[in-house]
Amino acid sequence: MLKQALRRVASLDAFILISGVLFWYLRAHYWRSNHEEPFSDLLGYIAAGTNIAQHFFFGLDAAHPTYYTPVTPSLIAIAKLFGGDRYDRVFRVLVQVIAFLGAAALAHELTLATRRRWLGAAFFFIVAICRPSIFWSLKLATEPVCEAMLYATAATALRTLRTRSVPWALVAGFFAIMLGLNRPNFAPGALLVPVLLLFCVGPSPTRKEVEEGADPPPRDDAPPRRRLSVSGRGLALAAAFCVVFFGIWSVWIGRNLVNYGAFVPTASSNGQPALWEYGGGPVKVGRYDHLTLSDGSTFSDFGHIMEETGRYPFDYQAAKRLNQIAGAWYLANWQDLPRVFLWRLKHMVANRGASGLTRLSREDLFFSPAFGYNSPFTQLAWINLMLVDKTPTVCLLALAGVLLLIWRAPAAGLILGALCVTPWLVAAAVIGYERVVESLIGLMVWLALFAVAEIAERFRPVAAAPAS
């Protein structure tokens, strides 16, 4: 029995090592085999990062001082300071180091939460061979940064929950604000973390509890589950998290308020997605021919949102106008919003892609040309066929995985559910671009695997006890 246990441990260690090697090999090979000149928002992030590195100005230009959120441009600025003309390579390595360490830490926490080491190892392997993770790692965009911050936030939040450690709560608050400020649809989920820490954390644990994890396994002989209640320790952890989270956020809000006299909590460009699909026009044909805004003015130039923003000298002024139009649009179409919400969710579940932010294939990453042969078939490399990705089945199983994880480890499951499910709902309330959930796919595939493992265990036949 001992030899078998040691063999299993050694096999898992080798599997984790192979996963780590695959993580860096696949990304380095993809970077070496592909090149893409920046365009659209990618150029904007680079321009903002250049301004930060050279002038400490967190804006695109004098007319657009609040157009982008500061996280991705700040990382580009750091890459420029250390990498010079090769800042793009430094940026990729920097972001992937955060993703690698965050995924490794989260794999450890998932091992403790599920009481199955192979599931933690499987998460690390899934991240290593995740197609969208490899694809976005090349781009100087918010998606790879979001994925890295998501893993770091989830790992530090689960460690805070398990150890009841105030220093770890501070670290979790830092990564959570980086995640939420980088892509605002992740902010509500990040804000649920301190609420869950407040209600799900009991007194300080013993050393054995720290080593074994916070939540008991769902066995018939397991002790009763701890009910949700506020404890002094939970209050301290939630307060520490919020001090860092809101402290950093207030710096960005204060910068915009003091310098430009405008309340811009995230970025002035965030008013555009709500109007991007309909342009202010009605969801149901013929419902109205103009919108009446809060200031008494009207808007009827549907489909020309970008032209509307061009009428104002500063981006925060244009954002105020777009927010007025968006508010009037939601009010005028409130009867059709549930239908639009479900349409967007269906689209994001059924489709995957970069929503136009790429000139490279999102699906075909690696090729293996058959030199010297005439092959009528695709030149895709075998490894490309083995990469994991989002499908409708994976999405449905991932939702089941969240529910099953909440059943097995309630607090840990609620935290992962908040970080993984909330971004879908927030995004679907604003826009239906499938790109907004690309950073979640690695974790979703693992949740789908967890659901399959849990269901298989429930239906596993139990050996009958010998007759006495």
Image (cartoon, rainbow, N blue to C red):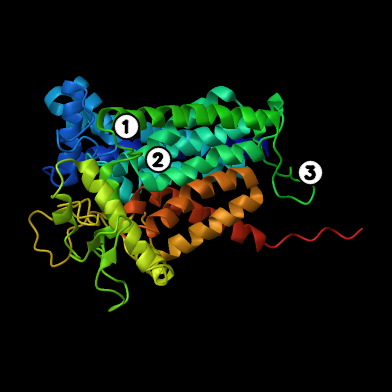
Indicate the quadrant containing the N terminus: top left, top right, bottom left or bottom right. top right
Q: Earlier in the sequence, mark 3 or mark 2?
A: 2
Secondary structure under tag 2 reads: helix
Task: Tell me the distance, in whole angstroms, between the alpha carbons under discs 3 and 2.
Answer: 36 Å
Task: Tell me the distance, in whole angstroms, between the alpha carbons under discs 2 and 1.
Answer: 20 Å
Secondary structure under tag 3 reads: loop
Q: Which callout, 2 or 1, points to the residue nearer the camera? A: 1
The residue beneath circle 3 is 223
Residue 425 picture location, percent across and down: 44, 57
Q: Which callout, 3 or 2, points to the residue nearer the camera? A: 2
When asked about the image quadrant of residue 159, the answer is top right
347 up-or-down from 172: above or below: below
Q: Earlier in the sequence, mark 2 or mark 1?
A: 2
Residue 332 picture location, percent across and down: 35, 67
The residue beneath circle 2 is 180
Residue 452 picture location, percent across and down: 54, 59
The residue at the far front in this view is 296
What amino acid is at disc 3?
Pro
Indicate the quadrant containing the C terminus: top left, top right, bottom left or bottom right. bottom right
Task: Tell me the distance, in whole angstroms, between the alpha carbons under discs 3 and 1.
Answer: 52 Å
Q: Residues within 10 Å of mark 3 (few under 14, many from 20)?
A: few
What amino acid is at disc 2?
Gly
447 up-or-down from 86: above or below: below
Residue 153 picture location, percent across and down: 46, 36
Between 197 and 29, the residue placed more toward the observer is 197
What amino acid is at disc 1?
Leu
| Residue at x 36%, y 53% (from the top left corner) | 437
The residue beneath circle 1 is 257
Q: Which callout, 3 or 1, points to the residue nearer the camera? A: 1
419 up-or-down from 53: above or below: below
Q: Which mark is residue 318?
A: none
